[in-house]
Amino acid sequence: MVSEEIRIIAEQYDIDLSKIKGSGPNGEVTLEDLEEYIKEHFFPKVKEERKVFGIRKVIAERLSKSYREAVHVTLNMEVEMDSLIKMRKELAEKLGIKPSYTVLMLKCIAKAIRDFIEINATMEEGKITIYENININVAVDSPIGLITPVIRDVDRKSLEELLQDYADIVERAKSGRLKEKDFVGGTFTVTNLGMLGVDSFTPIINPPQIAILGLNRIAQKPLVKDGDIRIANV
């Protein structure tokens, strides 16, 4: 004999109660028995549980709050990259190392931000603050996951300085040697998933900043220009 509640739940899962070994009086199936059966047969088995702590916990909480509270509007745009690819090749010959696309794009992005400085801002407690310094947080991989250390005054630095700064934060991120000062003072964020073959994504705004830019992969596509069709890197 089982309760009506147990019968109703069993019907929802098409469970034959006679197949469940009951732990109640005279082998009666209890609600706990049914819940355990459902958990075992209808839910995925847990392989591993990991606690989130430290900076990773802080990042997760901040981004979750941002996604819940900030209105995210995504604008997608394709840009011809042939000139940048050519410039990268020339710089590689000149510098002896091939600059990453992330660094080259940081230089371009900083120039665009300088022209549209209103986007170089944060919003807190109903107040928008626009900044003179263009300090860009860059998403990089680390042993604890994706983190966003900052490169300061990007528009005022030479390409060689940016290459050095970027290499430094990537190396220190991988070795776990970043400090609190490496995360504060950012005014805009850039994240690049192009190396993973991603064509489009919606990055989460890094609060209290008001905007973020996501970079995708470079792919060859037909391009129509002045009535002619050619294959271009986009």
Image: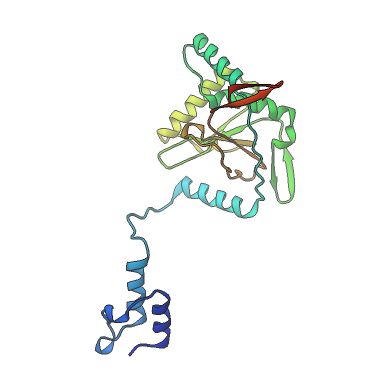
Query: Is 149 situated above or below 163?
Result: below
Q: Residue at x 69, y 35 (%)?
A: 120
Q: Is residue 18 visible?
A: yes
- Residue 64 percent across, percent down from the top left: 55, 52
The quadrant the N terminus occupies is: bottom left
- Whether residue 159 sits left or right of residue 142 in the image: it is right
Residue farthest top in this picture: 94
- Residue 35 percent across, percent down from the top left: 36, 74
- Residue 90 percent across, percent down from the top left: 54, 11
The quadrant the C terminus occupies is: top right
Residue 147 vs residue 87, the one in the foreground: 87
Q: Residue at x 27, y 89 (%)?
A: 25
Q: Is residue 158 visible?
A: no
Residue 198 vs residue 45, the one in the foreground: 198
- Whether residue 103 sits left or right of residue 145 in the image: it is right
What's the image's color scheme? rainbow
Q: In this figure, what is the number of numbered marks? A: 0
Query: Is 180 situated above or below 44?
Result: above
Q: Which residue is drawn at 35% across and 88% down?
A: 2
Q: Residue at x 58, y 38 (%)?
A: 184
Picture quadrant where residue 46 is located: bottom left
- Whether residue 76 sits left or right of residue 116 in the image: it is left
- Whether residue 234 sits left or right of residue 5 in the image: it is right
- Residue 62 percent across, percent down from the top left: 56, 49
Picture quadrant where residue 107 is located: top right
Query: Is 80 situated above or below 118?
Result: above
